[in-house]
Image (tube, rainbow, N blue to C red):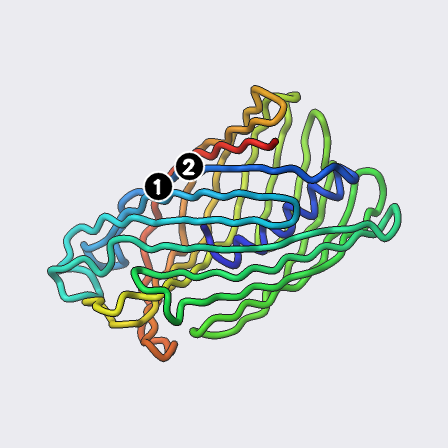
């Protein structure tokens, strides 16, 4: 799981696909994703961490249930900018999310879309870990090749509320072969489809998520940790069968920040991390 900025990116991706594909029947789909981010230190320190992430999701009609876990490997703990210098600040962070999204056409040019999600993100206990996300917007087709999207998302959490703009300029979406593009916030994608089986995509996106720390956390009892940053990935999509898709490729993560909040949701400190390399593999199947 990649948080509410990722939710906003998924909203635009869903609206883009639905707009390009006309009105297809809803399907049951399942997906599994595994990825990792290599070791990186905190700025001007020798301590740091690496991450392995696993995500599972099931989608039926407009509903999606997803679970994700991030496992951390810490190095040189005495040099970390937080924690007690001997224990891991945390080992695993979990997130469970239930969401709904839908879209509809007003006419040939206009369509609408929305997304609503509720989640719990936590280290051990779920208390006070609730997060909310609501977004909606519209798409307008300028002609057969070009379209624009405009939307707004609102996130709510004990650590604060925020409003997220969702903007997109689309070109050649739904193309069976050749180049296509989606330029906007919080995600930008340039793609080339070689045919029905293979496509190559260059994706840049913003990421942010917040988890509630354990009651017995040696870092901050019942506090919160937020991770945010930017990533760029080069992904290959392979569809060996009609309902099966595999996505894999390398990524680079930068402008990374770890922010600590106390149990009341008030910000304590924020720490920058070095650039790190990673990779991911995702398998999806629809029925």
Q: Position of residue 266 (x, y in %)?
A: 37, 78
Circle 1 packing at 10 Å, graded few (<14), some (14-19), many (20+), is many
Tell me which residue sits at (40%, 67%) in the image: 129
Q: Are marks 1 and 2 in contact (CB under 8 Å)?
A: yes
Determine which residue is flagged by label 2.
Answer: 280
Determine which residue is flagged by label 1.
Answer: 36
The residue most toward the right is: 107
Q: Toward the viewer: 165 or 67?
A: 67
Marked residue nearer the N-terminal end (1 or 2): 1
Relative height, residue 188 to residue 129 (above, below): above
Circle 2 packing at 10 Å, graded few (<14), some (14-19), many (20+), is some
Instruction: Give how far apart the Cα atoms at labels 1 and 2 are.
Output: 6 Å
Q: Position of residue 34 (x, y in %)?
A: 39, 38
Tell me which residue sits at (56%, 19%) in the image: 240
The quadrant the C terminus occupies is top right
Q: Residue 25 lies in what quarter of the image?
A: top right
User: In the image, 250: left or right of 6?
Assistant: left
Q: Position of residue 224 (x, y in %)?
A: 34, 68
Q: Position of residue 251 (x, y in %)?
A: 43, 40
Tell me which residue sits at (72%, 44%) in the image: 170
SS for dot 1: strand
């Amino acid at each position: 799981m990649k948080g509410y900025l990722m939710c906003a990116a998924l909203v635009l991706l869903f609206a883009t696909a639905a707009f390009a594909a006309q009105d297809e029947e809803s399907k049951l789909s399942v997906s599994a994703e595994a990825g990792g981010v290599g070791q990186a230190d905190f700025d001007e320190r020798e301590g740091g961490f690496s991450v392995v992430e696993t995500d599972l999701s099931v989608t039926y009609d407009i509903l999606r249930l997803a679970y994700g876990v991030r496992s951390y490997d810490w190095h040189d703990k005495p040099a970390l900018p937080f924690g007690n210098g001997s224990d891991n600040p945390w080992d695993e962070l979990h997130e469970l999310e239930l969401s709904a999204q839908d879209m509809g056409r007003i006419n040939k040019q206009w369509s609408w879309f929305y997304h609503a999600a509720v989640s719990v993100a936590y280290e051990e206990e779920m208390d006070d870990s609730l997060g909310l996300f609501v977004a909606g917007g519209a798409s307008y087709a300028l002609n057969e090749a070009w379209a624009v999207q405009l939307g707004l998302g609102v996130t709510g959490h004990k650590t604060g509320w925020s409003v997220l703009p969702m903007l997109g300029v689309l070109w050649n979406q739904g193309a069976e072969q050749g180049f296509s593009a989606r330029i906007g916030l919080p995600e930008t994608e340039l793609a080339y489809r070689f045919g029905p089986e293979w496509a190559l995509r260059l994706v840049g996106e913003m990421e942010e998520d917040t988890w509630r720390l354990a009651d017995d956390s040696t870092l901050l009892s019942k506090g919160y940790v937020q991770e945010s940053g930017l990533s760029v990935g080069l992904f290959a999509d392979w569809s060996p069968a009609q309902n099966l898709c595999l996505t894999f490729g390398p990524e680079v993560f930068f402008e990374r920040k770890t922010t600590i909040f106390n149990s009341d949701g008030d910000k304590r400190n924020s720490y920058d991390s070095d650039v790190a390399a990673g990779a991911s593999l995702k398998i999806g199947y629809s029925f």
